[in-house]
Amino acid sequence: MTVRTRIAPSPTGDPHVGTAYIALFNLAFAKAHQGQFILRIEDTDRERSTSQSEDSILDALRWLGLSWDEGPDVGGPFGPYRQSERGSIYADHANQLVDAGHAFHCFCTPDILDGMRAEQAAAGLSPKYDGRCQHLDPQEVAQRSAAGDRSVIRLMVPADGESVIVDRLRGEIRIPWSQVDMQVLMKSDGMPTYHLANVVDDHLMAITHVIRGEEWIPSAPKHQLLYRYFGWDMPELCHLPLLRNPDQSKLSKRKNPTSVLFYRDQGYLPEAMLNYLGRMGWSMPDEQERFTLDEMIASFEIDRVSLGGPIFDIEKLNWLNGEWLRHGLSEQEALRRLMAWGFGQSFFESAWPHLKTRIATFGDAEQWLRPLWVGEPDYDAIALHSHGLEPDVVVEGLQYLVWRLDSERQWSRESVMDAVQFVCQQLQLKMKEWMPVMFIALSGSTQAISAFDLAVLLGPDRTRARLRLALERLGGVSKKAQKRLEKSYQAACSAQ
Ligand code: GLU
């Protein structure tokens, strides 16, 4: 048997460090067994998937030095590797399940489902589809479909007993069928859900080991049913522990930048980043701290992954990056990287238009370029507060701006300006009242190149991280305030 593993990201946002971590372990496992590693794009959520996000995921993985044997960019014998290009495969498989009585058409409208959930909540039950369309007469189904009634296809789930899943790291996991929902497999728009598409593709792409984050454990019983109904062997499952913030909570961008591209733009070495991800729950047999991808592959044993939540700690990453700079690269190579990051032709080309009107000699350049080079701007809460705005307003504005820019897929001077305008409208502020906060948050100083230009030069990830840092320096937003702000933010967005 050839070992085949895969990473199957959904292109709906920034390339997450968690995706890179799972990709690394899949690659290491496959290569340690002389196998193959596949990249598949799971873009069945047409509203949230973007090609920009797909590109940035591929860029981020490549920057880290990961490569795949098959994928949407390199092709391969089991393509296409983008689920949006495999539509008819899923429809055929869903129909097979219906014909065999393993799945059923469900005509329940959103209103009916809301009512069902409300009744269940009132009775203290957890929400779940109650199966009312499960035994519709096939003739009635045909008539209603012919009359244009929209339906979804749901999975049949046994009424009694339990699902027994074997996880390579955890052993047996038992989940009673009564806790498993009759999952929608095909939506009424003809698109498959994650569950159907994922199982069908893992089978058709001959995946032998599914190595993914532990948040997918509750999906395993549904997948098990699908394999059983289709009469296919289930790949071996291995759920890796989720990355955590230093306070043990699930890794989130509120506490740590989570986009791989942030680390690239901030000047980390890809080797150090990959090495650090390789130490999430795993270590070299001799506890060696600095190692390359090839060294990791040569010693990789997945059974040595420890299940205690691995902590993603920037302080430790910084230490390891320093080790790599000093001992992992030749002097010449380290200098080459440094130049390429912030002292090369392209860096100065993009900065020059903003410099040339402001400097008399090159000796004046540093103060304008400093915000682009620093890891964290040197500011304190006092500076952020010293421009006549109430502290609450500054916090609220920064939080709105972070949210607004988080959902911004196009990054340009105009899009950042639109986001700032939106915030000003919400806070009933004039742009010029808000801009000092923006200047300080992005540069640490009120004397800087235009904040919009700076945001473009810094790029989306570093800009967002600085706004978050400013928020944090102001004491952050309490959970309660967060809820209130979120409500008014949502209302403001939908009123637009
Ligand atoms: N598309 C899923 C994700 O975004 C894949 C999960 C899996 O590996 O099964 O993580």
Image: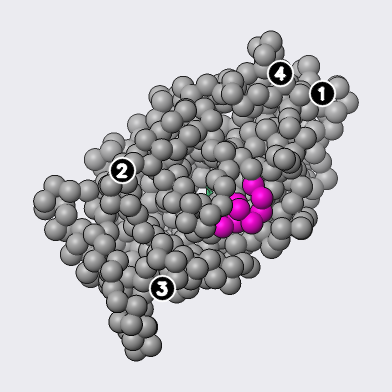
Expressed as whole percent of the image width and height from the top left, the position of residue 416 reads 52, 57
Q: Vertical placement of 339 versus 147: above or below?
A: above
Check the image and name the residue furthest to the bottom.
Answer: 147
* Residue 290: assigned label: 4
At mark 3, the secondary structure is loop
Of circles 4 and 2, which is in front? 2
Residue type at the position of mark 3: Ser
**Helix, strand or loop status at disc 1:** loop
The CA span between labels 1 and 3 is 54 Å
Residue at the disc numbered 3: 188
Q: Which residue is mark 2?
A: 161
Which residue sits furthest right? 332
Label 1, residues with CA under 10 Å away: few <14, some 14-19, many ≥20: some
> How many residues crowd mark 2 within 10 Å: few (<14), some (14–19), many (20+)?
few
In three-dimensional space, the C-alpha distance between marks 2 and 1, rounded to whole angstroms, equals 57 Å
Q: The magenta stretch spans which residues? A: 198-207
Q: Which tag, 2 or 1, sits closer to the chain's start?
A: 2
Which residue was labeled with disc 1?
A: 329
Picture coordinates of residue 101, whole percent (x, y): 40, 66
Whether residue 145 can be seen here:
yes
Outermost residue toward the top in this view: 286
